Amino acid sequence: MGKSELTITEATAMFLHVAASMLESENLLTQADKAVGDGDHGIGMSRGFAAVQAKLESAPPATVADLLKTTGMALITSVGGASGVIFGTLYRGGARNMGAETVFDAGTLARMLGDGLAAVQERGKAKPGDKTMVDALAPAAATAAEMADSPLDQALPPVAEAARLGLEKTKEMIAATGKAMALGPRALGHVDPGAVSMWLMLKAMAEYVVDW
Amino acid sequence: MKKAKKVINNPKNVVPELLEGLVEAYHGKIRKLEGLNGLVKTSLPEGKVGLLIGGGSGHEPLFHGFIGENMGDGAACGNIFAAPSPDIVLAVTEALDQGNGVMYLYGNYTGDILNFDMAAEMAEEQGIRVKTVLIWDDVASAPLHRIHERRGIAGDVFVIKIAGAISAVSGDLDEVVRVTTKARDNTRSMGVALSAGSLPETGEPTFELGDDELEIGMGVHGEPGVGREKMLPADAVVEKMMDMILADLPFVSGDEVCLLINDMGATTMMELLIVNRKIRQILREKNIRVHDTVMGGFATTQEMAGFSITLMKLDDELKRCYDMPAASFGYKWV
C-alpha cells in the first residue's frame, strides 16, 4: 500500500530513510567520483547524512519548512566541498515558500524541487547540460510540477525516474564546472557523481512512500 | 592497487587531530576555534586587514601551515581535499576582523568559491567588509584566454607570502587586494605526477597511473591532468614544463623571478635538485635572474609522487614585499 501524503512525522521518517540509503551508497558514490573527480563525494555525503540523521533524531522538526532547513543546514556545515553547499541549498531553498504546513504531499514535493532548483542555480550558476546534479534535478522538478496534484506515491516514482534518465544523460556531457571540467572530453562516458546523489535521494523517497 | 599505509588514528578524526598537532607546533602563536576546523593567530595588531587563507586539508603545510608573521592571519580548514564549510569561514572571519575588513585568499576551485562566497555574504550581513582574491597559477589547467578557470596549485605559497607582507604594512583592504592580485597575475606553475596520493580515510589512491607513465598537468587533488606519456628523463620533463610556463606570462629576458620547486609528497630532495639544475640552465640561457629559490614540500597531496615548478615575476613593489621577513610553520624567509 502506498502513501498519498505524509504527516510531518512520516516526512521526517522519509528523510531518515534517505539518510540511511545515502550512507549505504558511500562506496558507489566514491567510485563514481574517482572516475571524474577526486573521489571524496561518497565520504562527504556520508558525513553529511550522518549529521542529518543526528539532527532530525535529536530535534524532530515541527513543520516541513523546519525539516528542509534542518536537513539543508546539516549538509552545508558537514559535507564540505561543493556538494555541501549545493545539496544544502537545494533543501534550504526548497523551504523558501513554505509556511507552517505540516503535510508533505506531491504539491510540497513540486515546490521543494522547483524552488530548490532555482536556489541551486542561483548559487552554483550551473545550467542544464553542464554535467552537474542540475541535470538530474531539473527533469525531476519538471515532472514533480506536472504531478503536483497526484497522490505522493504516484508522483515520486516518475520523479525519481526522471532524475535517473537525466543522470544517464550526463554520460554524454562534458563538464562545464567543478573538478571534472579539467578532464574535457575525457569525462565522456562517466556520469556526474552529484547527479547520482540527486537520483539516490529521490529514489529513496519513492521507496519510502511506495513500500509504505 | 595496494592501499596506502598511514600513521593515523580513527580516519574520521584526521583533520581535527592534525590541526591540534599544528597548534602545538606554533607554541601559542595560533589557536583552534572551539568545535570548528578554523585557526587564528592569538594576537593581531589593531586595525590590521585580516588575511584569511584556506581550502581542503590533506595538502599540508598548505594552507594552515602558512599562518604566521607577515603571512596569513587565520585559516579555514576543510576536510581532506574538500572546501571548508561556510560556518568555519565565517567564524574565522569574525575572529580576524579588526574593523578594516578581511581578504579571502584561496585556490580557484568550484567548491571553495561556493563555500567562501556564502560565508562572505553572511559576513557582509554583519557589516564585515570582505574581498576575495582567487589563486589560479596552474598553466596546464586551462588555456590563457580562460585563465579564470585555472586551478590554484603551489603558486599559493608566493601569493600568500606577498599578501601577508602587504597586509602587514597597509591598513587598506583595497590596497591589499591590488598588490595580492598583481602577485597572482605574475605567478605561473605547472606540475607533473608520477604516482597517485591516497585519500587518508580509505587508503584508496585518487587515480591510477601506469608504472611506466607520468602525467603532466596533474592537479593537487589528483584530478587527471592534460596528457599522459611514457616516463622521461628529468631534463626532458623540465624542458616541457618550462616551455609552457615561460611562454604563458610570458617571462622574458631581463626578468627577475622567485622560483619554487614543490614536492607533491613523495619526490625526494635529490630529484628536486636535479630538476633545479635544469631549470637554472634554461633560465640562464633566457637571461632570467632568480632572486630566491625555494624547494621542498609546500603543497602536497599525501604520498603523491611528482613535483611542480612555480615562477613569480618580481617588480620593485613585489620585491619589497617578498624581502620582508616571514615566519610560519611551512615557510620562512629571513
Image (cartoon, grey):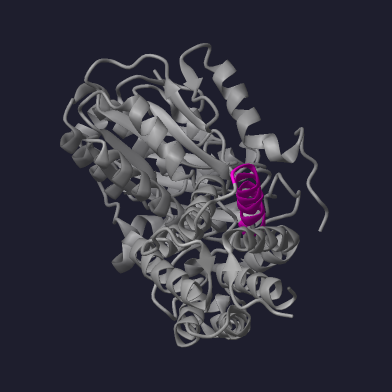
Image side of residue B81 versus residue A113, left or right: right
- Residue B189: x, y in percent? 42, 51
The boundaries of the magenta stretch are A40-59
Q: Quadrant of the C terminus of chain B?
A: top left
Looking at the image, is A33 positioned above or below residue B9? below
Residue furthest top as drawn: B28
Residue located 27% across and 52% down the image: B252
Q: Position of residue B273 (x, y in %)?
A: 57, 38
Q: Is residue A21 above or below residue B99?
A: below
| Res B284 visible | no
In this view, the residue in front, B127 or B143, is B127
| Residue B313 visible in the picture | yes
In the image, residue B238 lies at what x, y percent? 52, 54
- Name the foreground residue: A66 vs A195: A66
Q: Is residue B213 magenta?
A: no
Vertical relation: B105 (above or below) A165: above
Name the foreground residue: B286 vs B67: B67
The picture places residue A39, in percent across and down from the top left corner, at 64, 59
Q: Residue at x 41, y 44 (%)?
A: B155
Residue at 75% in and 76% down? A211
Q: Horizontal placement of B30 versus B304: left or right?
A: left
Does the magenta segment cover residue A41?
yes
